Amino acid sequence: MLVEKDILKALDSMRPFLQADNGDVELVEVTEDGIVKVRLQGECEKCPLSIMTLRAGIERSLMKKVPGIKRIEAVK
């Protein structure tokens, strides 16, 4: 089972990059089947490139740092 504190620690390491563009990310839920649900905030929420941030930035980094993550999903 994925450990929420490890995911939060990994998200904390990404926050400065998101906050530099007036954005942020919030952990919403971690499912038992390895899906991490996050909410993009601030400028990230309405940015047309947010899917790239989610996939190429957040998802790739989380999957590298926390074994067992299968996918990242953005929720509203």
Image: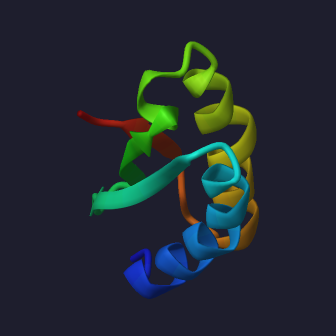
Expressed as whole percent of the image width and height from the top left, the position of residue 74 reads: 38, 36
Q: Residue at x 73, y 48 (%)?
A: 60
Q: Would you identify the image quadrant in which residue 46 lies?
A: top left
Q: Residue at x 43, y 75 (%)?
A: 2
Q: In this view of the protein, which residue sits in the foreground, 1 or 14? A: 14
Q: Would you identify the image quadrant in which residue 53 lies?
A: top right
Give the answer, above or below, for where 40 lies relative to 49.
Answer: below
Q: In this view of the protein, which residue sits in the foreground, 20 or 51? A: 20
Give the answer, above or below, for where 56 lies relative to 3.
Answer: above
Expressed as whole percent of the image width and height from the top left, the position of residue 30 reads: 32, 62
Give the answer, above or below, for where 22 lies relative to 19.
Answer: above
Q: Would you identify the image quadrant in which residue 40 lies?
A: top left
Left-right relation of 8 to 20: left
Expressed as whole percent of the image width and height from the top left, the position of residue 65 reads: 71, 71
Q: Quadrant of the C terminus?
A: top left
Q: Residue at x 72, y 44 (%)?
A: 57
